[in-house]
Amino acid sequence: MLSAGDAQRVAELMRETAAAELLPRFRNLAEGEIREKRPGDLVTVADVASEQRLAVGLAAILPGVPIVGEEAVEKDPGLVDLIARPGERCWVVDPLDGTANYSKGRDVFAMIVCLIDDRQTVGGWILDVPNGRMAMALKGQGVVIDGKPIVRKSVKRAPSGLIGWSVRKVLDKQLAPEQRRRLSRLSTLNCAGREYIEMLSGTYDFNLYRRTKSWDHAAGALMMVEAGGQALRFNGEPFRPEGSPDGGIISALSADVVATATDVLERLELPLLRR
């Protein structure tokens, strides 16, 4: 297990990396510094520089532990196999979560780091870069934002959620009014890391993603559980970082909220939460 001192070193490394690589380039990118990895999937020079700095720093914190970075996986897809390797550890890094927002000058982006040990997430860090908020969780030790413990909150109203536009469009079209009223406002921030922080802060109550890459969700899923909530795959099983990226995730700080959102969403014709 990572020591408390080393956990703080990870948080400090992330803040230093954001200050050195992300913030100076924000709204200062030249046209040639943004490209598409594939249609609709952007990468910038800031993503690459941030990942490189994080890799050096994490290697100093835990020498010999390999690093699975989102951009490194583009060059070597086999790196993701480390996440599912029994008995081994690896860092999983999203150096700039919300690249599309960042490249358009929108101040909704984050940095995510997690530590995997024997196929389980044992540490997670999310930095809301523009606002400086740091969420941190160690397995079995709870979750904090800027040192303040986060605990499960009961929701006595229709829960609000963070759901992609395509799902929201179908939901509003298909649901009967009495079912739609069981959920309140639905939105998306196009940045998983920021969305987890907003859920921990109580701004939103649950999230749903159909595609779940570990560098986007492993840290946040750990935080939901450590705060007393749930993070489940669409088949009802607990989220695990080595699972299929098509397994989906629905998470909240309350099991009751997960149950309510799941019951409503299962009424859609989309093949979402089918058991």
Image: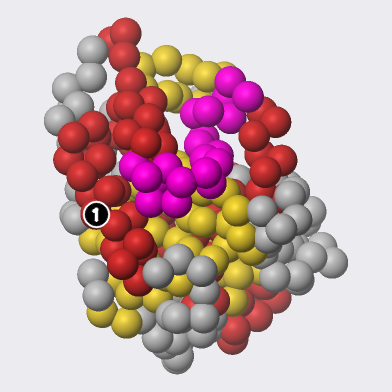
Q: Which residues are magenta?
A: 57-76
Q: Give the position of the C terminus as an image quadrant.
A: bottom right
> Which residue corresponds to the image point at 46% horizontal and 71% vertical from the top-left?
138
Residue 208 at x, y percent in the picture: 58, 59
Coordinates of residue 261 in the picture (x, y in percent): 61, 73
The verdict on residue 272 being magenta is no
Q: Residue at x 59, y 86 (%)?
A: 256
Q: Determine if residue 31 is in view.
A: yes
Q: Is residue 104 above or below residue 95?
A: above
Question: Tag 1's secondary structure?
Answer: helix
Instruction: From the top left corner, tell me how far across and down residue 84 is, in percent.
Output: 72, 50
Q: Is residue 260 above or below residue 1?
A: below
Q: Residue furthest front?
A: 63
**Closest to the observer, 126 or 3:** 3
Name of the residue lying farthest toward the top = 32
* 69 in the magenta segment: yes
Is 65 placed left or right of 190 in the picture? Answer: right
Task: Report the side of 39 relative to 32 (left or right).
Answer: right
| Whole-percent x, y for residue 81 in the image | 71, 40
Instruction: Give the residue at mark 1.
Output: 12
Type of the residue with mark 1? Glu
Seen from the viewer's position, the closer of residues 23 and 163 is 23
Residue under the image location 60 percent in, 53 percent down = 89
User: Does 122 appear above or below 88?
Assistant: below
